[in-house]
């Protein structure tokens, strides 16, 4: 299908050939979709994003991106690699990994410069993305001097400067304060409204409703145990509980013990 | 009463933590570079070239009288750039010239530098004679070192490290080399913090290690752990670079903005150096 961005068929991947990370993943992602990949720690979410970004390649099965099979040797061709990387951008979970340049400005410029964008245009983009993410005051700062929230926004800016068609977010809201979480959710929603495909790996169920229309749940067997609309998945409490995404919460109300499931944004007695 | 073994362990811990604190403070603090001042306002390329000119001239001059104006210039520039004179003098005038004095000490004596005696003394039957050429040479050496160190310190504290690295590219240093150095610099802080945290974590769990052997084990384990994490992180950083289009030939931002002030400064530097150089060779 022409609007298919990614198609995964029976994808298996293991680290060092002996530690399985993905086992038989099948998935089709279409242009403009908002997808969330949820699951407990160690279920293969980050590995999936790295596969989609062409950083690692499956041991078995196929990954097709924009109608072409994603192969390791195809990335050796600079033109082909650039064509793909200009269309797909990954925001890593650890911003310290993504921000490897000595200043924020150079980090944002790094991507476009590799693709041969002229310095004047790069300077224009830096100012533009800095304004979008409200980081103008950080441009000449050194990344290690920034707070976690600031680093995360700069990491997003470094990908936004490339302006890819597909954004891959790995735990974009982990460890952030509520206001920064709000900014990142708004950014994701706006990007999707501009026609960008969004794929987010997270176990933060509070944000799923806003950042995803479709949700895939990864289980301990390192494969998809269920996929569907965000509403249907979030309402399947037994599925969420069996996959460590919600838990039974015990506390006291007015001197009596109270036990309930801990669900995202759901009021209780 | 303090256990001597505790002191030994504290010695290891304190040494490591003090070294890390010094590293962070000395190489990664950009306190003065972020201030508003004369040197901070100059284009890093022009500033670096002018300071290189000063350095070459200072090294080539053989007269204290001619080198002294450069030291005076350093003090004026430090004042104009918002650097407290006390800190500047402590950093440039005390430690490094003191060490150079130790190096130059043997040349004071007639046995190394013969000439007109200035002062002689007797210690355990040995006669030491300090000569005028020896003394002149030693003073010239120390003044030259003090001035050169002052110039280098001024340049490094008033320029952001990222900009200094960028200037390397102007001198034709390959982009890959510059990128590698800048990444080392970038992650130095991160790993220093990591080592610091490991030490704090160890201390919080086991308190003060009571045996020296245990202390050595902690340090060895720390080194191995940092090495593992460094290797892992370098692989991930490489992935992050590839993800943003890196294919082996990095392209980096190299835009600078020169103003008439920068050209004027460079002109002044050339005039000062040329006139003192000329004077030094006609004396």
Image (cartoon, coloured by chain):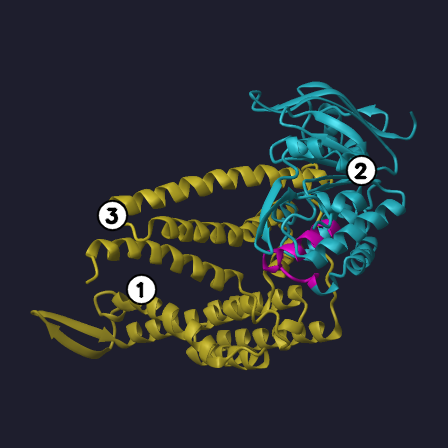
Chain colours: A cyan, B yellow
Q: Nearer the viewer, residue B160 or B106?
A: B160
Mark 1 vs mark 2: tell me if same chain: no
Determine the chain carrying the residue at label 2.
A
Q: Nearer the viewer, residue A169 or A125?
A: A169
Closer to viewer: mark 1 or mark 2: 2
Q: Which residue is mark 2?
A: A230
Mark 3 vs 2: CB contact within 8 A: no
Closer to viewer: mark 1 or mark 3: 3
Mark 1 vs 2: CB contact within 8 A: no
Let me know if residue B152 appears in the view.
yes
Does the magenta segment cover residue A101? no
How many numbered callouts? Answer: 3
Which residue: 14% across, 76% down? Answer: B121
Q: Which residue is mark 3?
A: B212
Which residue: 37% across, 73% down? Answer: B94
Closer to viewer: mark 3 or mark 2: 2
Mark 1 vs 3: CB contact within 8 A: no
Q: Position of residue A254 (x, y in %)?
A: 60, 56
> Extreme left residue here?
B125
- The residue carrying pointer 3 sits among few (fewer than 14), some (14 to 19) or many (20 or more) residues within 10 Å by Cα, namely some
Q: Nearer the viewer, residue A51 or B169?
A: A51
Mark 3 vs mark 2: tell me if same chain: no
Q: Quadrant of the N terminus of chain B?
A: bottom left
Identify whether B210 is placed above or below B112: above
Q: Residue A72's image quarter? A: top right
Q: Give the SS element for disc 3.
A: helix
First to last magenta residue range:
A138-157
Per the picture, the main secondary structure of the magenta-coloured stretch is: helix
Determine the chain carrying the residue at label 1.
B
Does the magenta segment cover residue A145? yes
Q: Residue A92's image quarter? A: top right
Q: Position of residue A96 (x, y in %)?
A: 61, 49
């Amino acid at each position: 299908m022409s609007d298919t961005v990614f198609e995964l068929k029976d994808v298996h991947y293991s680290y060092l050939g002996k530690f399985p990370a993905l086992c038989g993943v099948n998935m089709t992602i279409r242009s403009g979709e908002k997808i969330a990949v949820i699951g407990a720690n160690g279920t293969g979410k980050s590995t999936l994003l790295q596969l989609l970004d062409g950083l690692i390649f499956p041991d078995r099965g196929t990954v097709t991106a924009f109608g072409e099979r994603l192969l390791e040797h195809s990335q050796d061709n600079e033109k082909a690699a650039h064509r793909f990387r200009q269309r797909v951008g990954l925001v890593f979970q650890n911003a310290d990994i993504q921000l490897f340049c000595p200043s924020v400005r150079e980090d944002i410029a790094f991507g476009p410069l590799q693709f041969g964008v002229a310095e004047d245009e790069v300077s224009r983009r830096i100012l533009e993305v800095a304004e979008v993410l409200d980081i103008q005051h950080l441009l000449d700062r050194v990344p290690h001097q920034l707070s976690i929230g600031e680093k995360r926004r700069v990491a997003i800016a470094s990908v936004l400067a490339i302006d890819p068609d597909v954004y891959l977010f790995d735990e974009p809201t982990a460890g952030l304060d509520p206001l920064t979480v709000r900014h990142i959710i708004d950014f994701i929603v706006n990007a999707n409204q501009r026609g960008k495909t969004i794929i987010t790996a997270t176990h933060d169920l509070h944000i799923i409703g806003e950042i995803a229309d479709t949700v895939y749940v990864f289980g301990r067997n390192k494969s998809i145990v269920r996929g569907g609309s965000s509403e249907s998945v979030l309402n399947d409490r037994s599925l969420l509980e069996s996959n460590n995404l919600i838990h039974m919460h015990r506390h006291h109300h007015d001197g009596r013990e109270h036990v309930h499931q801990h669900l995202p944004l759901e009021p209780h007695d | 009463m303090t256990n001597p073994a505790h002191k030994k362990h504290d010695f290891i811990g304190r040494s490591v933590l003090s070294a890390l604190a010094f590293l962070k403070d000395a190489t990664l603090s950009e306190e003065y570079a972020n201030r508003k001042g004369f040197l901070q306002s100059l284009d890093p390329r022009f500033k670096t070239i002018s300071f290189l000119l000063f350095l070459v001239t200072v090294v080539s001059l053989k007269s204290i009288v001619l080198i002294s104006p450069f030291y005076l210039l350093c003090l004026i520039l430090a004042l104009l750039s918002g650097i407290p004179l006390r800190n500047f003098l402590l950093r440039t005038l005390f430690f490094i010239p003191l060490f150079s004095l130790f190096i130059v000490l043997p040349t004071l004596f007639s046995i190394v530098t013969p000439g007109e005696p200035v002062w002689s003394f007797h210690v355990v039957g040995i006669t030491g004679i300090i000569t005028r050429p020896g003394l002149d040479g030693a003073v010239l050496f120390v003044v030259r070192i003090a001035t050169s160190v002052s110039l280098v310190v001024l340049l490094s504290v008033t320029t952001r490290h990222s900009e200094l690295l960028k200037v390397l590219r102007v001198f034709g240093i390959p982009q890959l080399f510059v990128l590698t150095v800048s990444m080392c610099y970038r992650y130095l802080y991160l790993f220093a913090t990591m080592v610091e945290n490991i030490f704090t974590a160890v201390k919080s769990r086991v308190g003060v290690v009571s045996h020296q052997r245990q202390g050595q084990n902690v340090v060895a384990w720390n080194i191995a752990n940092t090495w593992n994490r460094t290797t892992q992180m370098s692989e991930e950083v490489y992935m992050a670079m590839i993800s943003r289009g890196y294919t082996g030939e990095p392209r980096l931002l190299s835009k600078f903005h020169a103003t008439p002030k920068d050209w004027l400064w460079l002109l002044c530097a050339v005039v000062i150096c040329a006139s003192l150089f000329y004077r030094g060779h006609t004396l």
